[in-house]
Image (tube, helix red, strand yellow):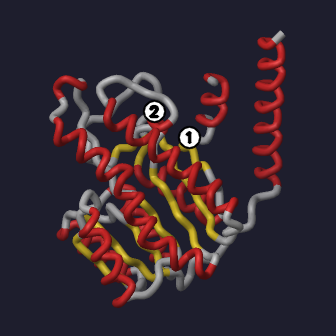
């Protein structure tokens, strides 16, 4: 009996998802303007962070760019300035809590209150668990999830005071399903997805519905961090494709952004 009820529930969810997608295709969501918004992007020195900065620059946002690589973040800032954006670039280690807090204080003094946060900085060390160094495991969690806590805690009070803002968590499909040789990475991304979901529910419980949340969950992305990325399970995406989906999700206040979008159905079927 329980199996029949589960199957009926699954059929309803799938039908609802297809109907929702069909309606959105013909009636697209209204897009918000981000012109003039102060946007903080971590890991902005390359990959998803860099291209995301370009997209916000095109939309006349004011940018605050963080990266541990000073040269990389300065290069991103230079290109954004060419697009007409006001940019402030900082060298910040997103695994260091004290450095995060001091950098947030500096940003508030020099730029102002952040209205859109893109927690994008990430670390990955592909290897078998027994071949992974202890410090690599620690670094993965410090960057991929603990950094999200420290940055969000530092920026959230001003957002809550105004009941306005948007917090973006860059996670991965590995936060929903696992693969071998990436145990620390998958575990940290499961935590990132949980962070997004719990934060979303808590903000709603507190009545802060003006603060939006989004979580990006792509399959493997060719950002240059991992050499020759490949998988039998999913396609390898190019960075620009992922960023287009991310920006579209932010502008339409989409809570969960899967790339490719059909991953949503695949995960429902797996459950």
For label 2, the residue is: 235
**Quick one: SS at disc 1?**
loop
Of 31 and 180, the residue lying toward us: 180
| Among the 4 quarters of the image, the one containing residue 227 | top left
Labels 2 & 1 near each other (Cβ < 8 A)? yes
Q: Nearer the viewer, residue 226 or 164?
A: 164
Q: Where is residue 50 in the image (x, y as percent from the top left)?
A: 35, 64
For label 2, the SS is: loop
Q: Nearer the viewer, residue 58 or 270?
A: 270
The image quadrant where one finds the N terminus is top right
Residue picked out by circle 1: 260
Q: Where is residue 171 in the image (x, y as percent from the top left)?
A: 45, 47
Point out the residue furthest to the front here. 206
Quick one: 161 or 27, which is closer to the camera? 161
* Furthest-top residue in this view: 1
Disc 2 to disc 1, how far (Cα)? Answer: 9 Å
Q: Which of marks 2 and 1 is nearer the N terminus?
A: 2
**Mark identifier at residue 111:** none
């Amino acid at each position: 009996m329980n199996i029949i009820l589960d199957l009926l529930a699954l059929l309803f969810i799938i039908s609802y998802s297809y109907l929702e997608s069909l309606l959105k295709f013909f009636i697209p969501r209204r897009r918000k303007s981000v012109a003039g918004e102060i946007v903080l992007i971590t890991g902005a020195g390359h990959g998803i962070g860099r291209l995301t900065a370009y997209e916000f620059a095109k939309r006349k946002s004011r940018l605050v760019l963080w990266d541990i690589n000073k040269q990389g973040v300065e290069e991103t800032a230079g290109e954004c300035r060419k697009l007409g954006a006001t940019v402030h670039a900082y060298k910040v280690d997103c695994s260091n809590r004290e450095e995060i807090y001091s950098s947030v204080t500096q940003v508030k003094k020099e730029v102002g209150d952040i209205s859109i946060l893109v927690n994008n900085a990430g670390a990955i060390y592909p290897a078998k668990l027994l071949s992974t160094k202890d410090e690599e495991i620690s670094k993965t969690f410090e960057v991929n999830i603990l950094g999200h806590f420290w940055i969000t805690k530092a920026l959230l009070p001003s957002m809550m005071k105004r009941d306005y803002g948007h917090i973006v968590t860059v996670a991965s499909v590995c936060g929903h399903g696992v693969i071998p040789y990436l145990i620390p990475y998958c575990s940290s991304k499961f935590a990132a997805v949980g962070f997004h979901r719990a934060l979303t529910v808590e903000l709603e419980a507190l009545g802060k519905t003006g603060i939006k949340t989004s979580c990006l969950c792509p399959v493997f992305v060719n950002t240059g961090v991992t050499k020759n990325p490949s998988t039998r399970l999913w396609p390898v995406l190019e960075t620009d494709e992922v960023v287009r989906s991310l920006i579209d999700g932010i502008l339409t206040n989409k809570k969960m952004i899967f790339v490719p979008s059909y991953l949503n159905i695949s995960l429902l079927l797996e459950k």
